Amino acid sequence: MTLAAVLCSITIASAQDAQEGRNQIYNITLGIVDYAHHNEKMSTGEAVGKVLAGVLTGQTSVQATKYEEDVKNAIIKGLSGAYRFRYNDGLLRIDDIAGEGNLLVDALITNIQTKSSSHTWKDKEDKTHVSTTYTGICEVMLTIKDAKTGEVIANPTMGGSGMSSSSYDTEDGAIREAIARLSSHITTWLNQYRPLEANILEGSTVKKDKQKEVYIDLGSSEGAFVGLHMGVFVVKTIAGREAKSQIGKLKILAVEGDDISLCKVQSGGKDIKAALDAGQQLLVMTIDK
């Protein structure tokens, strides 16, 4: 899956200024949720074309129909969980969500199924037992569009998988677990598309030649919380283009105000200290753990 990351220029500003520029909050709206024909095999290009044209067969499998609301709710949960997006449940007018950076999302559910495997074994009393493992699969292709221009930004395919083992029929549990995991993949994509960003204000604890703690200009007003993981990047301008390379990782230990947090340096302490001592431009932004 190709993940687009759009980085804004970083300036040290007040919490109010930051909300209006850096780490701006955007609206995100779920539009159409459709199902592909359960016997119809489609390439990604064909699926995209059908979503954009609104031409689908309207036929669904019994299984897909059964989980329709669960999948839709999982998508909404994923859209609602991102740091810099606020889910719009349809109460806002279309004019209200047509601002710069707001997103419209259509979804095509391409696959809901289970796979099973069985293992037969005997106990000490020579009694035969059968254990069956079920794997649930739920795949959704999202068409993510700019709400202002209608331009398609990306068509990522999100998948969730879940597993349960039992001597009884637990296909339902495996599918529901797969659907639940779908949410985290959607949230992760959005967080990588619009990460939270910050600067290192100053170093705190140092041990020998390694930075152990730093203060960053991200606080409660922009959604910082204890346990948030962030990467530290060196930023350079090469031929008029911005290039960055990761040199370390941080984890927020304490949110100490609207625009300040104390972070533990989890990795790259030596490189971070050297960069700070040299006055290099450093970018801090949220990453996966």
Image (cartoon, rainbow, N blue to C red):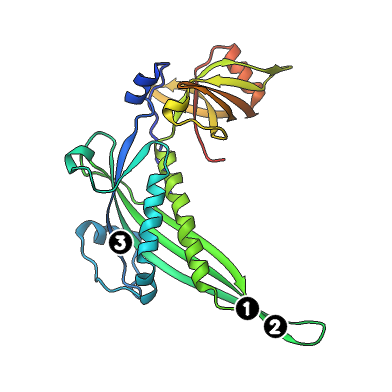
Q: From where the camera sits, is residue 267 visible?
A: no
Neighbour class for label 2 at 10 Å: few (<14), some, many (≥20)? few
Q: Earlier in the sequence, mark 3 or mark 1?
A: 3
Position of residue 140 relative to residue 136, above or below, is: above
Residue visible at 36% across and 52% down?
A: 76
Alpha carbon distance from label 3 to label 2: 43 Å
Which structural element holds mark 1? loop
Residue visible at 60% across and 76% down?
A: 117
Query: Which percent across, then down, holds residue 5?
Result: 41, 36
Alpha carbon distance from label 2 to label 1: 8 Å
- Pick the front one: 66 or 241: 66
Neighbour class for label 1 at 10 Å: few (<14), some, many (≥20)? few
Look at label 2 and name its amino acid: His
Query: Which percent across, then down, holds residue 240?
Result: 37, 21
Which residue is label 1 attached to?
A: 167
Query: Given this view, does label 3 or label 2 mark the residue nearer the observer?
Result: 2
Q: Earlier in the sequence, mark 2 or mark 1?
A: 2
Question: Is residue 217 found left or right of 264 in the rendered image?
Answer: left
Q: Earlier in the sequence, mark 3 or mark 2?
A: 3
Which residue is label 3 attached to?
A: 47
Look at label 1 and name its amino acid: Ser
